[in-house]
Amino acid sequence: MLRSFTSRMVGAAQRTNSAVTASAVRLFSATSTATQATPTSSTASPSTPSSELSLLRNQLRYYAVAEIKNRPYLITKNDIIVLDRLKDVKLGDVIELNQIKELGSKDYAIQGAPYVSSEYYSIKATVIEQPKGKIVETFKKKRRKHFQRRYHIKPLHTLLRVSELEVKA
């Protein structure tokens, strides 16, 4: 019984692998003919950071994917960001966000590897509040030992308002 089950599994795996390779070959051949049909002349505009920035600069609104405390946040101007407590800031402090993974607009985007260079943008946020969150209950139990505990905590947050998000020329 076990031998027939494993042979069926192997047969199914071989069928799926052959289907994947056949579709990959079709996809590859379609892309290879498309690349051959495209002319490779020097009339195509070169991709330089200044030309990409000028295209992005002409847009009305921008967004950025900022990494704060190792978590990504999608931000725009005047957004309020709720994040875990930042211990070393006070109310009214202005923070400059410099770990930006992506900077873009509706039509264009610049992605960093891993971050976009800080000479291309200026993003500042202001600390507006440091409240406590809602009560979070944690329940722990051990079976058959008559052990039950309920822990209640109020997590601390920091609220930031994005005051400036500009793309430098």
Image: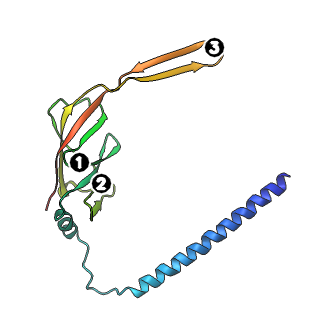
Q: Position of residue 78 (x, y in %)?
A: 19, 45
Which residue is at a point 47% across and 23% down the rendered structure image? 138
Circle 3 sits in a helix, a strand or a loop, which is it?
loop
Residue topped by disc 1: 98
Question: Which residue occupies 35% across, 87% down?
Answer: 39
Q: Residues within 10 Å of mark 3 (few under 14, many from 20)?
A: few
Q: Amino acid at mark 2?
A: Tyr
How far apart in space, not on screen, are marks 2 and 1 (Cα)?
9 Å
Q: Residue furthest top?
A: 146
Kindly identify the residue that appears in the image at 47 percent across and 84 percent down.
Answer: 33
| The label number, if any, that marks residue 115 in the structure image | 2
Left or right: where 127 falls relative to 102: left
Q: Residue 145: which numbered mark, if any? A: 3
Q: Badges 2 and 1: C-beta atoms under 8 Å apart?
A: yes
Q: Is residue 142 above or below residue 14?
A: above
Task: Please state, as top left, top right, bottom left or bottom right, where the C terminus lies in the image.
Answer: bottom left
